[in-house]
Image: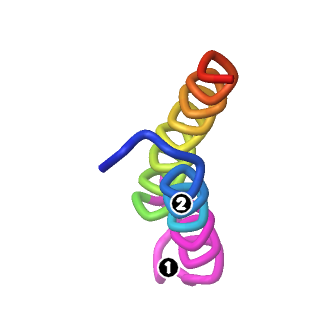
Amino acid sequence: MKLNLLNAIIILSAGLLLIATGAFIKPTHVQFSNPTILSGLTVEFLGTIWLVLSLNRRRKKS
């Protein structure tokens, strides 16, 4: 994947979708950590890094 703003927005959207899905899933037993929410947060973290790097690259180009 190229390091650009559109890809960063797609990654952030996917992470947000995972977090929303994990929030609406009702587990039958109590868990301390929901793996869906944790994976969504990981994708959000990577998407944020991707966004910062793409904005930095865009700033250096112009």
> In screen coordinates, is 23 left or right of 33?
right
Residue type, mark 2 in image: Gly
> Which residue bears the numbered disc 1?
27
- Comparing 44 with 31, the one in front is 44
- Residue at 64% over, 73% down: 20
Asked if one can make out residue 3 in the rendered structure from this viewpoint, the answer is: yes
> Which residue bears the numbered disc 2?
15
Asked if one can make out residue 32 in the rendered structure from this viewpoint, the answer is: no
- What is the x, y in percent for residue 17? 57, 73
- What is the x, y in percent for residue 26? 57, 83
Compared to 24, does 15 lie above or below?
above
Q: Which residues are magenta?
A: 15-34
- Comparing 33 with 53, the one in front is 53
- Helix, strand or loop at label 1? It is loop
- What is the x, y in percent for residue 39? 42, 53
Compared to 30, does 43 lie above or below?
above
The count of marks equals 2
- Residue at 48% over, 59% down: 34
> In screen coordinates, is 1 left or right of 45?
left
